[in-house]
Image (spheres, helix red, strand yellow):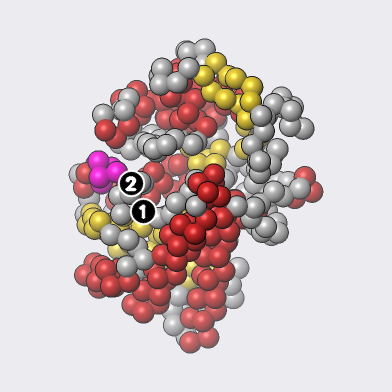
Amino acid sequence: MGPHPVSRLPDPTSILVTGGAGYIGSHAALRLLDSGCRVTIIDTLERGHIEAVEVLRGEGDVEFVQADCGDQAQVLELIDARSIDTIMHFAALCNVGESVEQPLRYYANNTGSSLHLLMAAATAGVPRFIFSSTCATYGEPGEEHLPITEDCPQAPINPYGHSKLLVEQALRAACTSARTAGRPFACAMLRYFNVAGSDATGRLGEDHDPETHLIPICLGAAAGRRDAVTIFGTDYPTPDGTCIRDYVHVDDLVEAHLAVMNALEDGDERVYNVGTGHGTSVREILDAVRRVTGVDVAGIDGQRREGDPPTLFNDPTRIRKDLGWTARIDSIDEIVETAWRWMQEHPEGWGS
């Protein structure tokens, strides 16, 4: 947490959403529109979907620009033209395995583009910056650090997590610089756990290529896209031998962003974990998918993947105390149900 705020920032009304055509970014843009904000999206569409943008265009005042958020000239133009007062920075590559295979690409995209975005924000005097970070910055915390608090040591074990940690460090330095210079600025870093589910109203959903997230993989098997789901490791020191993770619904995650956006005051430097505070194992996810879909999805026992900690779940005390935020959808069946509903309506993803 930063020092006591020295002044009130202008109310957030015009938000720049980087990666707003992607899974989490589009859900955030939708919620911002529903709350009456003006939204500007910048996205390369390398992994985002123009179809999601088209949905958003029907929901409110949306400007979309296909560009890299690291393009300072483009960002400065947007900030001026749209009177941006808040940046929500979601744009990033987020495949852990790919980051190991292509580390320089991850540092260039996740870290490099973020630094250029921060420089543009500082140049234009944007007073509020909210960064999409990750629990991957914690690496493999030992059992003594469970549940994970924001004070858990950060020791990422892959380029993805490290690329995000570097942005956190740069953002902290930018906050310090702004305070020293007397420039209005506040920032927040939200470290997500496993984000899942789809917009409860069915307007948006999750569509990655290739898909690496467990719940949509299991639902893909239920939909007949694959024969079975491989369980990577069945001999972990957990009740059923499989990895345990903290799954948070995307709608709840987005609410955390709005809560911190509305709470930030000048000089703030906030860090929050965002998760439910309890874990669900891989086998429990498979069971939930079977219950929700009525399909007996097959699970195949496989070998452990290097770098997969047995258990990761967070302690949500800080965000609950500071912002009054708590996950409203904490039933894994309900999370799966929202994802399944969207998948049934979009069997081929956004291309349906």
Q: Residue furthest right?
A: 144
- Place of residue 332 in the rendered image (x, y in percent of width and height, measured from the top left): 54, 29
Prevalent SS, magenta region: helix
N-term mark: 2 or 1: 1
Q: Quadrant of the C terminus?
A: top left
Query: Badge 2 is on which residue?
Result: 48
Residue drawn where x is 31% and y is 55% of the image:
43
Question: Which kind of residue does numbered mark 1 sit on?
Answer: Gly
- Could you say which quadrant of the image residue 4 lies in? bottom right
Among all residues in the image, which is located at the extreme bottom? 181
Position above or below: 65 against 340: below
Q: Secondary structure at mark 1?
A: loop
Work out which quarter of the rendered image holds the N terminus and state it: bottom right
Q: Quadrant of residue 278?
A: top right
Q: Nearer the viewer, residue 109 or 330?
A: 109
Q: Where in the figure is residue 258, as x and y percent of width and height? A: 43, 55
Q: Residue at x 64, y 22 (%)?
A: 301
**Would you say residue 311 is visible in this rendering?**
yes
Q: Residue at x 57, y 61 (%)?
A: 165
Q: Residues within 10 Å of mark 1 (few under 14, many from 20)?
A: many
Q: What label sits on residue 19 in the rendered view?
A: 1
Residue 211 within the magenta-colored segment of the rendering: no
Q: Which residues are magenta?
A: 48-53
Where is residue 111 shown, x and y percent of the image? 48, 63
- The residue sitting at 43% across, 24% down in the picture is 220
Residue type at the position of mark 2: Gly
